[in-house]
Image (cartoon, rainbow, N blue to C red):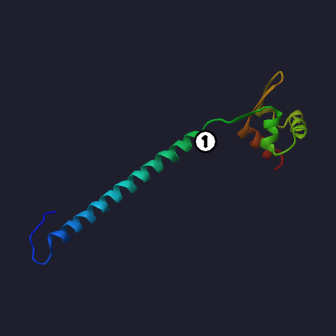
Amino acid sequence: MKITHNTEVTVREQLIEIQSKIVNILAFLSSDKEETETIEVSSFSKDKSLEKKYVYGLKGLASILGCSKSHAQNIKNSGILDRAIIQNGRKIIVDVEMAITLFQKRYE
């Protein structure tokens, strides 16, 4: 990008052309940066989806099944979700993915 002294093109017009090229380069670099951030966010969401998710108590079980606490108690007592539920005394921990899978298999 040399500035030449042509009679057809003035120095001002050459500076405007250089400035527009710089703006295009900066726009390209900023769009490249946004794509990189998008890739990083999507890879983070994949890692987050690999984590196990748990709910606690009959209230949590009722929320994932979309029913009342008493109905969740009946489903738990029926044994359908035994492999998804860990219970120690009054503490109940439910593996969400496994509970949904077992519940779907029951009604297939």
Query: Relative to the observer, which residue lies in front, 51 or 107?
Result: 51
* Position in image of residue 98 (x %, y %): 73, 38
For the point 42% across and 49% down, the residue is 36
Considering the numbered disc 1 on the image, is that residue within a helix, a strand or a loop?
Answer: helix
Name the side, left or right, on which 55 lies relative to 79. Answer: left
Image quadrant where residue 29 sits:
bottom left
* Position in image of residue 67 (x %, y %): 85, 44
* Position in image of residue 52 (x %, y %): 65, 35
Query: Relative to the observer, which residue lies in front, 66 or 106?
Result: 66
For the point 81% across and 32% down, the residue is 82
Q: Amino acid at mark 1?
A: Ser
Image quadrant where residue 59 sits:
top right
Q: Vertically, is 37 above or below 18?
A: above
Image quadrant where residue 102 sits:
top right
The residue at which mark 1 appears reads as 49
For the point 15% across and 75% down, the residue is 9
* Position in image of residue 18 (x %, y %): 22, 64
Which residue is most to the top? 89
For the point 80% across and 44% down, the residue is 65
Name the side, left or right, on which 48 lies relative to 39. Answer: right
Q: In the rendered picture of this protein, how many numbered marks are placed on residues? A: 1
Q: Vertically, is 91 above or below 61?
A: above
